[in-house]
Amino acid sequence: QITLIESGPTLVKPTQTLTLTCTFSGFSLSDSGVGVAWIRQPPGKALEWLAIFYWDEDKQYSTSLKNRLSITKDTSRNQVVLTMTNMDPVDSGTYFCAHSLHDAADYRYLDYWGQGTLVTVSS
Amino acid sequence: DIQMTQSPSSLSASVGDRVTITCRASQSIASYLNWYQHKPGKAPNLLIYAISRLQSGVPSRFSGSKSGTDYTLTINSLQPEDFATYYCQQSFSTPLTFGGGTKVEIK
C-alpha cells in the first residue's frame, strides 16, 4: 500500500524559505521508473506542477520557479524534501506530493497523492 | 513549456447526463495525456493515462479519447460522486503541465 504524507510549516513570512517534507511508504525511490513529484494549488486556482525527483537521481523543475526550488531525497528516512526560497504571498496554497510512475511504455503519471499541506505566506 | 488549455472552465450537469471535457496542447504531445479528478480537501485522483487507459479501480463510465489535436474526457451517466474538478496533464515533456481545470457542478 503506497502512502505519502506532506509536512511542513503552515505559516511562513515573505522572503523566508519554505521547507516541505514528503514522507512515503509502500515503495522505494530506488525502484526503476519511480519518482516523487511536488504539485501545488493556490486557493481557487488550478494545479501547478513544481518538481520531481526520479529513481535515477534525475531532478526536474518548473521553468518559472526553477531558480527558487530545490528537491532532494533522504533515502534512509523515505523522504523527499522540497525547498522554495524567497516566499511571497502568491505562493500560498496547498502543496501536494505524489508518487510518479514512468512505465515501460514511457508513460508518466501521478498515481498516488498525499492529502496536501496548506501553506500561508503572510507577515 | 507546453501549455494545456481546457474547456469549458465549468459546467452544470444533472445526474445521468453525459459530460465531455476537452483539452488541447500547445504542441504535439502524442499519446502522453492524463486526466485527474479533484474534490475539495481531498487528494487528486488519477482517472486515465495515455489518452484512454483507465487507472485501476476507476469506473468504466469514465473514458478518454483523442480527435485531431483535442483530447476528451467523457463521463457517461454522471453520478453524484462525480461532481468535482477535472484536470488534464501532459506527460510528453517536463515540466509536466496541467490544464486550467473544469469544474463540474450540479444543475
Image (cartoon, coloured by chain):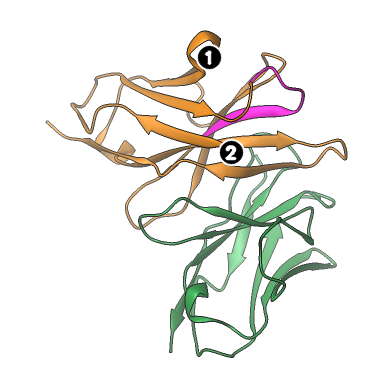
Residue A62 can be seen in this image: no
Which of the marked residues, 1 or 2, is nearer the chain's N terminus? Answer: 2
Residue B98 shown in magenta: no
Q: Which residue is rendered at x = 51% and y = 23% of the image?
A: A66
Residue B57 marker: none
In the rendered structure, the answer to whether residue B28 lies left or right of residue B59 reads right
Which residue is at the front of the view, A30 or A65?
A30
A106 on left or right of A80? right
Q: Is residue B99 visible?
A: yes
Residue indicated by mark 1: A73
- Kindly identify the residue that appears in the image at 67 percent across and 82 percent down: B76
Chain identifier, orange in the render:
A
Residue B99 % position (x, y):
58, 56
Horizontal side of A52 relative to A30 (left or right) equals left
Tell how many labels: 2
Quadrant (top left/top right/bottom left/bottom right) for the N terminus of chain B:
top right
* Residue A30 among magenta residues: yes
